Image (spheres, grey):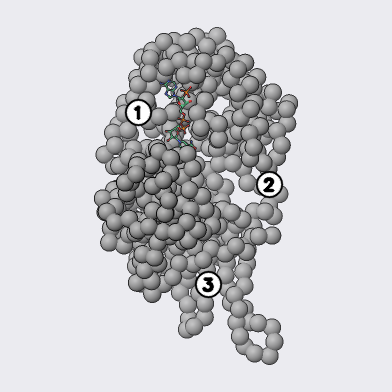
Amino acid sequence: MSKPQEAFALIIFGATGNLAQLKLIPALYDLVEANLLPKQMTIIGVGRKKMTDQEFRDYSHRVLHQPNRHHQHPIVEATAAELLGKMRYLAGDIAKPEIYQQLHGLLDQDRACTNRMFYLATYPELYQTVFEHLQSSDLNSQKCGFARVIIEKPIGNDLASAKQLNQLLAKYYVEDQIFRLDHYLGRETLQNILSFRFANNLLEPLINHEQIDHVQVTAAEDFGIGLRGGYYDSVGALKDVGQNHLLQMIALATMEEPRDFSNQAITASRLKLLQELRPDPDKLVFGQYDGYLREQDVRPDSKSDTFFALRTTIANSRFQDVPIYVRAGKLLKRTVTEVTFVFKTKGQNPPNMLVYRVQPNAGIVMRFSSKIPGPTFKLQNEYLQFCYKNSENGLPDPYLRLLVDALSGDQTFFVDAEEVEAQWQFVDPLVAKRRQIHSYQPGSWGPEAADQLIEADGRKWIEPSVSFCAL
Ligand SMILES: NC(=O)c1ccc[n+]([C@@H]2O[C@H](COP(=O)([O-])OP(=O)(O)OC[C@H]3O[C@@H](n4cnc5c(N)ncnc54)[C@H](OP(=O)(O)O)[C@@H]3O)[C@@H](O)[C@H]2O)c1
């Protein structure tokens, strides 16, 4: 991460919303703390709520002190003051032109020439009008400093709408101005999959169909949808996390080695893999937890999925005929995200496994067999593990990493237009099959049909270990 040096303005449309509260304001604090924000930086929050600059700073200060934020380290008031001192606020309707004139005035007042980063932490329905107003007010102009936009999921609701959004973006920006953020790509644990695979020549030669029996991906949460019912019910688990986070995780774990570690090469490898993934609508299970229909803002007859399990394959020579089993859901037995490569085995020996544990107890674990000390020749499972808990540097928040990258123009860990479309290309035929929804008990690993899906191939879901990296 190189530190951006010039004058910047970060304009957050939707600065009073949930995303800004949960992620952006805390990440900005971390950036100040890590001395990674440019010194000449203005952060302009935009929202409908009426607030003065000082009231926005007070609000942001309260956000920083909310319980469970920054639990890893306490807020240092001098650092918070440095951040708050950079903050301004504009109240108004971003669907109307007036606010863009005010924004122009505010930017000109601060500095004649400023790089601008527009973070759309607001509803996708507003994107078009925001882009149009940014264009007509000349705020998109790059005559003096750059103009970039960051948008978050959902990037479309299917392939057709994603294409429409990409076309809309292309009307106003070129691809290197557009930052489509999937925070999974900012996770240290996922980025390290690339380093682990390609900087060590030990295992990578074994990651192929001759050695790998199958791959399992689990993204389980032990909590429900909380207050997100309105949004969640309109998408379901497959679109909420499968279309984006999980496909990107699979891509990083299975893509071919990039030509080099440049943005273009890494993105090209990820894209190629995403395009090679084959959806199988006949190997697919949707589930819904008991009690979901009583959640706030959920339709009483909703057929939305809070769980899915699927089997897919990769149409390339390296992974031919290697099944990838994926399951994800809400209110499951434990919160755990991991990718496991299960190796082929000889005779009755338990298979070797390579596990990329994303959360909790992040790390990389290898399972192997070892002789039980003593007079017999019995084997037991042992584990070689690299655990982040042991790392002095800890794990930076993905938003910290991605904001620094966006400020410095590095798109390596952002999703480009073709990737988004490849992801929908995979998911659309599966969503079309969402007819039968199996109910499951909260606290289980999902519906029995998910077990049957993998057991039909003579395999079983791996119970994610609680002891990995539990140091
Ligand atoms: N929340 C998350 O963790 C999360 C995670 C990933 C992606 N996202 C995406 O991020 C976006 C924002 O989500 P959110 O959860 O933060 O939503 P939210 O809590 O409802 O916040 C929406 C924000 O947009 C502002 N806004 C809405 N209409 C406006 C208008 N006409 N003029 C000016 N400001 C307006 C609101 O301002 P006022 O409140 O002042 O009206 C508020 O600040 C969505 O696209 C969502 O899918 C959210």
Determine the secondary structure under disc 2: loop
Residue 40 in view: no
Q: Residues within 10 Å of mark 3 (few under 14, many from 20)?
A: some
Position of residue 285 relative to residue 162, above or below, is below
In contact (CB < 8 Å): disc 1 and disc 3? no
Q: Quadrant of the C terminus?
A: bottom right
Residue 281 in view: yes
Q: Amino acid at mark 2?
A: Asn
| The one of 425 and 276 positioned closer to us in this rendering | 425
Q: As drawn, is 402 to the left or to the right of 254?
A: right
Say which of marks 1 and 2 sits in front. Answer: 1
- Badge 1 is on which residue? 125
Question: Where does residue 124 sit, x and y in percent of width and height?
Answer: 37, 30
Question: Where does residue 113 sit, x and y in percent of width and height?
Answer: 52, 15
- Badge 2 is on which residue? 393
Earlier in the chain: of badge 3 and badge 2, it is: 3
Q: Residues within 10 Å of mark 2 (few under 14, many from 20)?
A: few
The CA distance from mark 1 to mark 3 is 48 Å
Quick check: which quadrant has ligand 1? Answer: top left
Q: Residue at x 52, y 53 (%)?
A: 222
The CA distance from mark 3 to mark 2 is 30 Å
Q: As drawn, is 163 to the left or to the right of 230?
A: left
- Badge 3 is on which residue? 352
Earlier in the chain: of badge 1 and badge 2, it is: 1
Residue 147, picture quadrant: top left
Ligand 1 lies under 8 Å from the Cβ of mark 1: no
Determine the secondary structure under disc 1: helix
The CA distance from mark 1 to mark 2 is 40 Å
Q: Amino acid at mark 3?
A: Asn
